[in-house]
Image (spheres, rainbow, N blue to C red):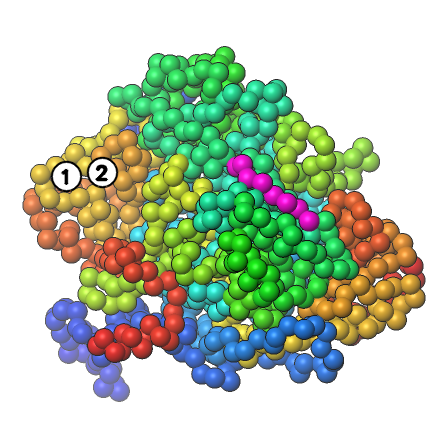
Amino acid sequence: MRYLPLTEADRRSMLEAIGVPSVDELFRDVPEAARLSGPIEGLSNHMGELEVDRALSAMAGKNLPAGSVPSFLGAGAYRHHIPATVDHLVQRGEFLTAYTPYQPEVSQGTLQVLFEFQTQVSLLTGMDVANASMYDGATACAEAVMMANRVTRRKKAVLSGGLHPHYRDTTTTDARFIGFETVVMPPAPTGGEDLLAEVDGDTSCVVVQNPDVFGHVRDYTELGKACQAKGALLIVVVTEAVSLGLLTPPGEMGADIVAAEGQSLGNALNFGGPYVGLFAVKEKLVRQMPGRLCGQTVDADGRRGFVLTLSTREQHIRREKATSNICTNSGLCALAFSIHLSLLGEEGFTRLAEINHAKAVQLADKLAAVKGVEIVNGSFFNEFTVKLPKPAADVVEALARRGVLGGVPASRLFGGGLDDLLIVAATETNTESDMDAFATALAEVL
Amino acid sequence: MSMNNQGRPTGIQSADSAVPETVTGNRGLQIEEPLIFEQDSAGRCGVDLPEVPAVASRLGAVKPRGRIGLPGLAEPQVVRHYTRLSQKNYAIDSGLYPLGSCTMKHNPRLNEKMARLPGFADVHPLQPESTVQGALELMSELGRWLATLTGMAAVTLAPAAGAHGEMCGIMAIRSAHDAKGDKGRTKILVPESAHGTNPATAAACGYAVEAIPATEDGRVDLEALKAKLGPDVAGLMLTNPNTCGLFERDIITIAEAVHAAGAYFYCDGANFNAIVGRVRPADLGIDVMHINLHKTFSTPHGGGGPGSGPVVFAESLAPYVPVPYVVQDKDGAFRLVEQAGDGPAFGRMKAFHGQMGMFVRALAYMMSHGADGLRQVANDAVLNANYLLARLQDVMTPSFEGPCMHECLFDDRFLKGTGVTTLDIAKALIDEGFHPMTMYFPLVVHGALLIEPTETESKASLDQFVTALRALAERAKSGDVAYFQGAPRLTPRRRLDETAAARKPVLRWSPVVEQEKVAAE
């Protein structure tokens, strides 16, 4: 077997050194009733690289890659162009096959990447400090709420109806089992919502998303001030990191915590994962933060170096008193995010955001010209909602048959209701002819 | 001295081997690399983007954002930056990485290639189901492998990592008790040797954590466990093989006692790699177990993630599997159940459907090994660990009698009176070209050194490690404390001041910090 270096001769001599006649003897502590005498039935035996490649390629061939057709799906996962450099660097074995940097002398590469990543996330979000990443945006959102509960010693979170339903559900799952209350506002695809009316003396936080799941761009500055007056924290969720190149950063709107999805930078769609959660806070909240943190220090010779720090918050030290049970971050996805952002730089990132917005404006104009289609949004970044005369779920199936991936039906996200709403995104990857193909196909199926 | 006909020396001239102070601070292949922010040049960019189409803004009434502060670099600079940084890392690709309980085994590149097929990597999670049948088939197939290997009835692929899987398992246990109207169960029992995530998970889910002591032979104290079991106990979280690298001999009796008390048995499957293909956890009486795909099934650790922590459930807990999950219709089509509805299944734990990229890698690994090869994986992992135990037991102090499973545990009794600590041994190993073993874990022995070689190490590699470790043990006993305390000396950085880092945390670069530093100097 190509992954196993021991030869039969090695095995024999090693058993001899151990002083046992067979490897079975090493498993003697396993209760006899549970010992299997041979390979487990119902599974194939070993295969060569070619055979595995063939079998998995056949499975992959049954999917329609988003890049092979005009594609306009967003709703928390966005198809952007990833420079070739990103994936090549990510695949360097020294990054790919290293563990969590617990031995800093031989992990300065990963640690410096994390320090730079934390800085980049702080800058993008306009916050003071960021951690070394979370599983994804949705879990970052749930962790942000739990952090707000710890900070305020209150137990009620108000969730905007514009929050991505997967983020909402991830948070309410935790609420049910971990024991806190959530006030979930109904989706408001066309209008605003009075979040402040729900804030009382028990409210730990208000969670809003910008742009929201329907694509609306909002200024939460006043809400932030009002929350502060009532002793609640403002949590701003961002599912499209590229929007931070153009929109007022959450930190400038008075966010106390930012929970975001970083997939848009450096990470492929991957059918939903792995992605990279971004988590940033105001300076004074650092010690209540979940997840890993990398900090700067000096070595025995006085040279600058980096270590994991403030680990007294974490489970491997604090056990049942930890701020979170999280052990892993999303290291390699954070690396991809960081490399992509380094390539873009200030100029590239800003322009990328501008292009995304312009593409969405172009698409909105083309779709608005289709009979029966109404653009719901007054404002948007690279994603907006359209109202259709037919159920959106049927429309996307019909579009798919015509070779267009035409957006995400709101009903799929919300589990029913909002049947006539379709959420549509455009990025730099969409050409004008893609948009025309979409508009034409849409006109045909309506 | 020999020269070629151009006058270029071809022999070796000098025997002076002292390491010089260089002008640049670089040392040959070890190159100093500033932060990316310190290489900024305004207006420089590593991508070429087209002109922005001229449109009227629809951003609404938000303030346009000002300068972000991102550095500008060209592509070659970015490539060099990350290449140089990568060279400051130790990795499984570079050498033996015997971190106990972490399972640093070879990461096959076929898995990377498969995960990057456009049919997997370039598929949006919310595409119509008719366009993602292959992705759903892959999830279904991975679930079938996991259920078959563990003998379990149901599986969820949703959790993003092992600790997330633990959370999922404990939520299922809570759901089951709740469904029975049994609200009096407030405790989870966790052995002292457990990973820190176990008590953290139980506590996060609102349970009081009670520790179970270990016996002299490194296993759960069965009598102490039985004494704690009662109508207030929701479940037991046990790692098997445990973190001392030992199989819990009494596990079936433990399961029976847990079930007799009306509680559920959660197994932390972090060490499943020791028994995969040889033992099915269902046959041990386990109700629910998470599996770290990045351990047993070799998806890369990536410097700390992403992980993936599927959870398998016995019949007892199968109704509580969270959404989303894949089902197959009678006509063979795959469907994704995304809403929990009113059934006993609980709601989602993350966005979308799980760590698909990790699923592809894990299935490629499973198919490569097959049922026969996975059994050999367990055999060789256990053989390698026992070989290390046998070769080191006379110079180091094993904590428990063997055989061990996939990892062998030593404590620091062999260092007693030498002035050398477990940490010092670890740092000296670095200079010998090895990644250290896990240090000071598990907590049940003093100064723990937990060594997990994995099945992908050759005998030659193990022998070299043994030679190094034996020499270090002898050196420690000879009283050469200064050697150890100064180690490592050959790394890009020597020991780092963790106390200073925590006292005044500097968690990001900022121009202000740099200015202060200059002012202080």
Q: Residue at x 49, y 50 (%)?
A: A148
Mark 1 secondary-structure assignment: helix
Per the image, the residue denoted by label 2 is: B447
Q: CA distance from mark 1 to mark 2?
A: 9 Å
Is B447 or A379 nearer to us in this picture? A379
| Quadrant including the C terminus of chain B | bottom left
Q: Residue at x 55, y 39 (%)?
A: A180
Numbered circle sitting on residue B290: none
Decide whether residue B72 is among the magenta residues. no
Name the spot of residue A27 as percent of width and height, x first: 39, 23
Per the image, the residue denoted by label 1 is: B415
Residue B183 appears anywhere in the view: yes
On the rendered structure, is B415 left or right of A53?
Answer: left
Residue B278 appears anywhere in the view: no
Callout 1: 10 Å neighbours few (<14), some, many (20+)?
many
Q: Residue at x 19, y 48 (%)?
A: B424
Mark 2 secondary-structure assignment: loop
Name the spot of residue B352 as percent of width and height, x first: 65, 48
Name the amino acid, label 1: Leu
The reply to whether discs 1 and 2 touch (Cβ–Cβ < 8 Å) is yes
Is B255 above or below relative to B346?
Answer: above
Q: Residue at x 61, y 20 (%)?
A: B180
Looking at the rendered structure, whether the residues under marks 1 and 2 are on a common chain is answered as yes
| Precedes in sequence: disc 1 or disc 2 | 1
Name the amino acid, label 2: Gly
Q: Residue B438 occupies which quadrant of the picture?
A: top left
Q: Residue B124 occupies which quadrant of the picture?
A: bottom right
Is B220 or A415 nearer to us in this picture? A415
Magenta segment, which residues? A178-185
Callout 2: 10 Å neighbours few (<14), some, many (20+)?
some
State which chain disc 2 sits on: B
